[in-house]
Image (tube, rainbow, N blue to C red):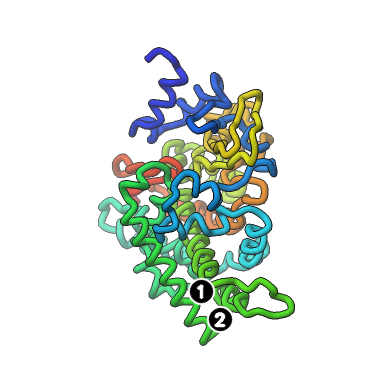
Amino acid sequence: MTDPVAQALAALRTPQGSADPYPHLAVLRELSPVHPTPGGGVLLTRYEDCVAITRDPGFHAQNAAWMDTRRPNWREHPGLRATTESFLFLDPPEHTRLRKLVAGAFTQRRAVALREFITGLTDRVLDAIADAGADGSPVDLHEILAARLPIGVIGQVLGVPEADQGALREPLEGLRLAVDGGGVEEHLTQIDRAGEALTGYFGELAARRRAEPADDVTSALVAAMVPGPDNPRPLTQDELEQTLTLVFSAAIESMVDTLLNGLAALLAHPAQADLLRADPSLVGGAVEEMLRYDTPVQGMARVAAKETEIAGVPVAAGGAAVLMLGAANRDPAAFPDPDTFDLTRTGGATVLSFGGGVHHCLGAPLARTQAAVFFPALLSRFPHLAAAGPPVRRGTVLRGFSDFPVTLR
């Protein structure tokens, strides 16, 4: 194979390419930045193209009508319904209607209000890390973070009791497979069990909140099911369960990936870790650089409503424009010296790690707050933190780790 573009595409499908996709994405961005794909779609790797498509009303979500053309039996699968029917895969006005019901809980103001809770929870998580590594043995940070930190934060927001959180971890892993690209058929039974478990749980939680309302998002959604003059379109039971499942799973899986990808970059660049340890006030820019350097959500797709073109490359009606956010965040036209990890980076464009346009991630303020609390606290508490062997990568679209062993001293 002598075609460098074909070589780069092939490499991305290998374990080695998945572990470090960025050199191969750079080849695509340089030689074929708008690359045709089967079915009349394109693969986009330039920052300006990705930004433009997130804002273009001529491109819509991978909605139910589009899914009907790609997988006609998708409604027969609870796991696929749990994702495809959520507002993430809807377009305005339905997307706007459902997103608005939960958006108020994820504003910058609400994230600031939760900072004290996040700080206390982070301290308890660091205590658990310290206990696990007290004898010098390796500690799997993935296991501790996935079991305690992001799930505890979003549990506080949604009203998921701490006692319930542990039982929800297995279905969370299953539902991740529905959106992580490839392998859906292989894992469909697991995905369906996960969808049934999570939507079923949130149906039960809603019933509890209907009887005993609390100050949480679940209670607010239960209230939105009651018709009235100010609520002509009451929320349905399916919409409630799917909305809570989406928000809960997205807030945990992507957040664990954000924390571990950022830590991997810090451990690989100890001078940068020392900068942040010495000056925690750098954390705002540091979090943006971590999100840019190793993007936890590598790609998203938008569907052309009609035949069009991008930079002269034709896109068929119904063709998917796949936005490679990880490649866009390493575009030298947007970020000078993009392959350098620099926590003091200034200028440049806005990172695309949370998407853009009407589908911009509503949890971005909460995610940034969690990361801004976590990293300075971790580096201060464990000044000799080091890798205890190679971490195990997982995911293609959702890029993270399944194991992340460290030693504390």
Q: In the depicted view, which residue is nearer to us: 177 or 258?
A: 177
x, y percent for residue 354: 58, 47
User: Local crowd at mark 1 within 10 Å, few (<14), some, or many (≥20)?
Assistant: some
Query: Badge 2: how crowded within 10 Å, few (<14), some, or many (20+)?
Result: some
Residue found at x 44% / y 31%:
21
In the rendered image, the residue lying farthest to the top is 2
In this rendering, is residue 369 above or below 318?
Answer: below
- 223 or 255, which is in the foreground? 223
The residue that disc 1 covers is 159
Q: In the rendered view, does 124 fall on the left or right side of 14?
A: right
Question: Quick check: 279 left or right of 182?
Answer: right
The amino acid type of the residue labelled 1 equals: Gly
Above or below 341: residue 198: below
CA gap between label 2 and label 1 equals 8 Å
At 36% from the left and 53% from the top, the residue drawn is 141
- Find out whether the residues at labels 2 and 1 contact each other: C-beta distance under 8 Å: yes
Residue extending farthest right = 229
Q: What amino acid is labelled 2 in the image?
A: Ala
Residue 369 visible: no
**Residue 28 % position (x, y):** 51, 24
